[in-house]
Amino acid sequence: MTTYVPSAAGLAQQLSPFGQQPQCWERKRSRAVRGGHVCCGSGCAAGCEPVLIRERTGWGWIDWTVPADGSLPEQPHRVAVFTPIATRSQRLALRWLARRPAHRIRLGKVTVRPATAVVTALTLVSAALALMQGVPFSIVLPAAALAPLLVEHLPDRLDTRAGENARIIEDEAACRYLQRLAALHTGLVQAAAGSDHYEVRRAVEIGHHQLFATADLLQRHDTRSASSELIARERLMLQLAIQTRQIVTTQCADRFGGQPPLGPYPPGPRRRPQPSAEHTTHVPPTKEEANMPQDGSEQPTGEVYLLFAHEAYYTAAAQEINTSLVAAASLLHPRVRQPDGARIYDRLTRGRRPGEIVPLATLTHELDGGTRWPEVGDWEAVTADLLQLIRNRECDALSLGLPDIARALVCSGPHSEVRVYDPAAERHQAYGPAERIEVLVEVGRQLAWAEAGCALWPGDGLLVPANPGGVK
């Protein structure tokens, strides 16, 4: 099986501010430098508030800071996602909420909106003129006091009311995750702009629902506690992006007489090898073919995956392969050591979420640090057999060449820490559970691309699992 990895160029462009309109970023940045405070890191006073540039989108907005060195910000300062089922009045309120962030000016120890300062000055002048015209002081004083208060506090009340239909995320890790999902959703929106297919428009709706549900989840949980669900959501978004691109590619091919225009395209559906006649053993159900969801209740697939590291080998293109991912059902292959493979399958799938990627080190952690492995099976023999299946092409796998630190993280337990010494800086750098989750997210992203059109094939003649209902 050939593994396709997406090109980073297009995604990186969508991750940057105003990815499709770089001149818009330069214009707004120049205005911010002239009229606002550009935060320069350690040189800023404590509690300073940097000027923000707001990028409005069809699903919400993204707030970017302005680096003092003139470079592009690497991640958003704040991300907001609007509800996808807003009424007309709610849409108007959300449009108000998405207006450009108000800058505040400092008057002594108090910061106010510029509009408040202007209205206060105008109110004082108007009050003086009114008193000169004989208007009673009892009328002028309340009006003069009320106007600045309304200008200062009414927008905040309106923002709070409109914010009930939006999910605003400011946590650094959560913003970084939503930024990736927003980049994928931007690709869906761009595809829908030039297509009249219902499936493409439906993919945009599903993408918006996923963005909002993810933002709602991140408001209630951190990225670490919700990592499994976040990985599943990102994989779904990736599959939506892949399938949408395939639909648009097919449409373009028809338009150009069967020849698609120049450019890279994701792989088409792969043909799964058919079982031979002598294989009559019952094959347990595996992951469904990846079809476009047709309603709002999208669910990830029911398959669980095993990720394990092994001795590195090299492909014909001299690419190092040191880690592999297979469908859990491959553990039931007759060429895998049995009953060890079946027992590990039962342990691997018991209580897992659909679509979950489980490193072998996680099983070791769950088995009391490996002391209970003899009760389950010989994992070294089983993984050696799986690797031989992969190299003989008797099952599908996602073959990876992970960097040293990433590989060390997946070979460690979920709560372990990997420490690396940097001789140049003469200090140790620690990598822990958060970085391990990021590695699994990246593996899930590559798995979604590899499974475009067809799920991982676990092999032929699989044994019947001892616990068919183990996956929950």
Image (cartoon, grey):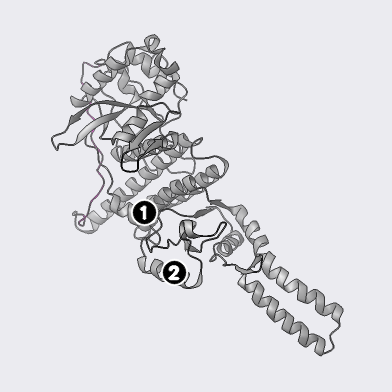
Residue sitting at 36 percent across and 44 percent down?
Answer: 238
The residue that disc 1 covers is 187
Residue drawn where x is 51% and y is 60% of the image: 44
At 76% from the left edge and 76% from the top edge, which residue is drawn?
Answer: 144
Crowd band around label 2 with a 10 angstrom C-alpha radius: few (<14), some (14–19), many (20+): some
Q: For the residues labelled 1 and 2, say whether their Cβ atoms are less than 8 Å apart.
A: no
From the viewer's perspective, is the residue at label 1 or at label 2 nearer? 2
| Picture quadrant where residue 314 is located | top left
Label 1: few (<14), some or many (≥20) within 10 Å?
A: many
**Which residue is more in the foreground, 371 or 252?**
371
Say left or right for 335 vs 187: left
Left or right, 161 with respect to 433, comes to right
Instruction: Kindly identify which numbered label has been placed on residue 446.
Output: none
Earlier-in-chain disc, 1 versus 2 = 2
Residue 12: image x %, image y %? 33, 53
- Residue found 25% across the figure and 56% down from its top: 252
User: Where does residue 215 sit, x and y in percent of width and height?
Assistant: 52, 47
The magenta segment = 260-279
Amino acid carrying label 2: it is: Lys
Query: How far from the left and from the top, in percent, is residue 172?
Result: 48, 48
User: Mark 1: which secondary structure?
Assistant: helix
